[in-house]
Image: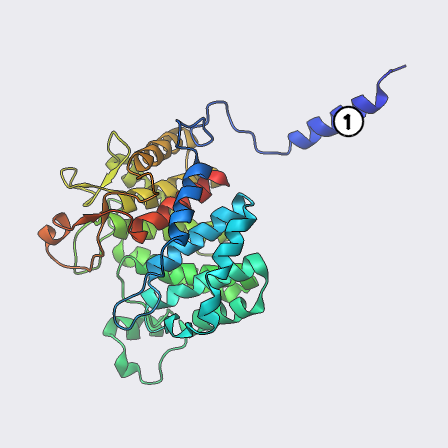
Amino acid sequence: MNPFPSFRVALIIIVGFSATLPVRAAGDPLSGPWPSGAAPAVIGRRITERFLSHDFRLTSKPPVMHYAETCAWYGALQFAQLTHEHDLTERLVARFESLLGPQAQLIPPPTNVDYAVFGALPLELYRQTRDERYRKLGLDLADRQWTTPVDQNELSPEAREAVRGGLSWHTRFWIDDMYMITMLQTQAYRATHDQRYLDRAAAEAVAYLDKLQQPNGLFLHAPDTPFYWARGNGWFAAGMSELLSSLPANHPRRERILAGYRKMMAALRAAEDAEGMWHQLLDEPQSFPESSGTAMFTFAFISGVKHGWLEADTYAPAARRGWLALVSRLEPDGALRDVCESTNKKNDREYYLTRQRVTGDLHGQAPMLWCVDALLR
């Protein structure tokens, strides 16, 4: 007679349950151990506190919420949720309250991609709080992104052609659009599970892949701007990572998007330097190491390994190098160095090579938080 029958039953249950969980190999580069001060939770808290200590970042004319503010806020909200830091969540939610009242004029009108992506933020707030005010605001912006103006003469030729093909009137085929358009629509899907939002995002992704991805796997800034700008490519890498994480295996456009993503990741893997950085122009290693693109690529690598889209043996060490290179550029107050300043498209190589490097810009703070979130998932 077994003197410990209940223990044996419990052991069987525990063993059986653990067999259903994902198993990480010993020494997995993405699960640590991390050098002192490099743990994702520690970094995430530092960057989030810095974000909360600053006023809204606004555009200049008119003064409305800048898309980089949206992207950093989204990353901070995800961090607070993943770490169960309810005090952070409360402060991040409270930060939005004035936009529902006395500062409502700071909500961008959905007249272009950079403005409309703001809707991804209230949709994340809705997902975490279930407050219908956020849902209504976010879905309004997502739907208006597809509500073509009556007078189509106001649209560019590219936008008119896109509308005829069932795409958003915001379509202009600049590389950062891939994130700005698809992120809003993906968030609308996450908040509603309405398939039309996911179909919109996937259609845009394929159109941009067909238009901008080159045979080497990288992306031009725009069809008339033949340069592989790091942050521009980073927006695409991050946008595909977000979309693929919500796109069902049986979606008709998934294989095309996944193939484009993997082709890009292979090219990026080859472009990473020994430290773990990517450079301002990806095919010119003599150009300066740039932090915002590096953070976006690191996020895409981490996401790919954790979702099984990329081979862990190849991409996990590359992602770890990227993360540690970024941490080495982080100031004690949580400000990331070597971030390329705001950049328009221009058919001029020197324009990209001589961009200023700034510290603490939200273009770098935001994807650093995305890396934190991906590592903690």
Q: Quadrant of the N terminus?
A: top right
What residue is drawn where x is 37% and y is 63%? 181
Q: What residue type is labelled 1?
A: Ala
Left or right of residue 61: residue 107: right
Counting from the top left corner in percent of width and height, residue 371 is at 40, 42
Mark 1 is surrounded, within 10 Å at the Cα level, by few (under 14), some (14 to 19) or many (20 or more) other residues, namely few
Give the image quarter of residue 174.
bottom left
Left or right of residue 209: residue 22: right
Left or right of residue 100: residue 331: left
Counting from the top left corner in percent of width and height, residue 128 is at 56, 56
Which residue corresponds to mark 1? Answer: 10
What residue is drawn where x is 56% and y is 49%? 86
**Closest to the observer: 224 or 121?**
121
Give the image quarter of residue 317.
top left
**Closest to the observer: 61 or 11?**
61
Question: Tell me, what colour scheme is on the image?
Answer: rainbow
Counting from the top left corner in percent of width and height, residue 143 is at 45, 72
Counting from the top left corner in percent of width and height, residue 210 is at 30, 57
Q: In this view, does 23 lie above or below 245?
A: above
Query: Mark 1: which secondary structure?
Result: helix
Q: Is residue 43 above or below residue 90?
A: above
**Closest to the observer: 279 or 204?**
279
Number of callouts: 1
Residue 208 makes an appearance in the image:
yes
Task: Report the residue that reaches farthest toward the right.
Answer: 1
Q: Is residue 315 above or below residue 215?
A: above
What residue is drawn where x is 53% and y is 55%? 90
Residue 249 makes an appearance in the image:
no
